[in-house]
Image (cartoon, rainbow, N blue to C red):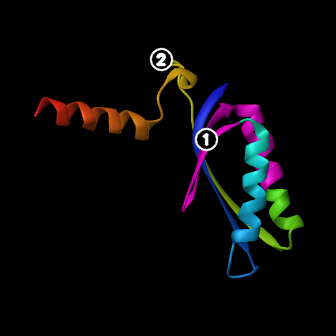
C-alpha cells in the first residue's frame, strides 16, 4: 500500500538541541528512497507502507542509539484508492500552481 504522511521524532531526556539526532534521521531518510521533505516541525513523505514502518523504526532506534533515553514519534498516515499518490503533485506544489493560475487570470 502506498501512503502519504508526516513523521515527527522528538528525543526525550536529551540535550536541548535536537540537531545531532535529527541529522542522523535525515541520513536514514535520504538512504531509504522515501520521497520526503523536512520542515521545522517534522518531515512529510510518500512511499510504500512497509518501507515507512521500517524507516520509522530505524529513525527511532537511531535517536536512542545516539543517547536519548526516550523518544516520541508522531506518525500521521493517509492512503487512498481514487488516485495514485506517486503521480500526484505534493499539496504545496498544487497550491502554488493554483495561486499562479489565479494570479495570471487577474
Vertical order, 97 against 82 (above or below): below
Within 10 Å of disc 2 (Cα), the crowding (few <14, some 14-19, many 20+) is: few
Residue on which the image places disc 2: 82
- Across and down, in percent, residue 88 comes to 49, 25
Residue at the farthest front position: 104
- Across and down, in percent, residue 20 comes to 76, 69
The quadrant holding residue 78 is top right
- The label nearer to you, 1 versus 2, is 1
Q: Is residue 49 magenta?
A: yes
Q: Is residue 106 magenta?
A: no
In the image, taking residue 92 as reference, residue 50 lies left or right, namely right
Residue at screen point 53% across, 25% down: 80
* Secondary structure under the numbered disc 2 in the rendered image: loop
Tell me the magenta residue range. Answer: 34-59
Residue on which the image places disc 1: 45
Q: Nearer the viewer, residue 85 or 35?
A: 35
Residue 14 is tagged as: none
Q: CA distance from mark 1 to mark 2?
A: 19 Å
Q: How many marks?
A: 2
The quadrant of the picture occupied by the C terminus is top left
The quadrant holding residue 53 is top right
* Secondary structure under the numbered disc 1 in the rendered image: strand
Amino acid at each position: 500500500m502506498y501512503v502519504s504522511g508526516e513523521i515527527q521524532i522528538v528525543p526525550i531526556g536529551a540535550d536541548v538541541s535536537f540537531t545531532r539526532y535529527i541529522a542522523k534521521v535525515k541520513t536514514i531518510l535520504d538512504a531509504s528512497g522515501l520521497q520526503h521533505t523536512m520542515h521545522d516541525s517534522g518531515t512529510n513523505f510518500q512511499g510504500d507502507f512497509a518501507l515507512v514502518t521500517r524507516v520509522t523504526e530505524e529513525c527511532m532506534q537511531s535517536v536512542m542509539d545516539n543517547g536519548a533515553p526516550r523518544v516520541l514519534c508522531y506518525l500521521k498516515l493517509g492512503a487512498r484508492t481514487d488516485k495514485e499518490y506517486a503521480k500526484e503533485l505534493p499539496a504545496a506544489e498544487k497550491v502554488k500552481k493554483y495561486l499562479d493560475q489565479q494570479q495570471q487570470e487577474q
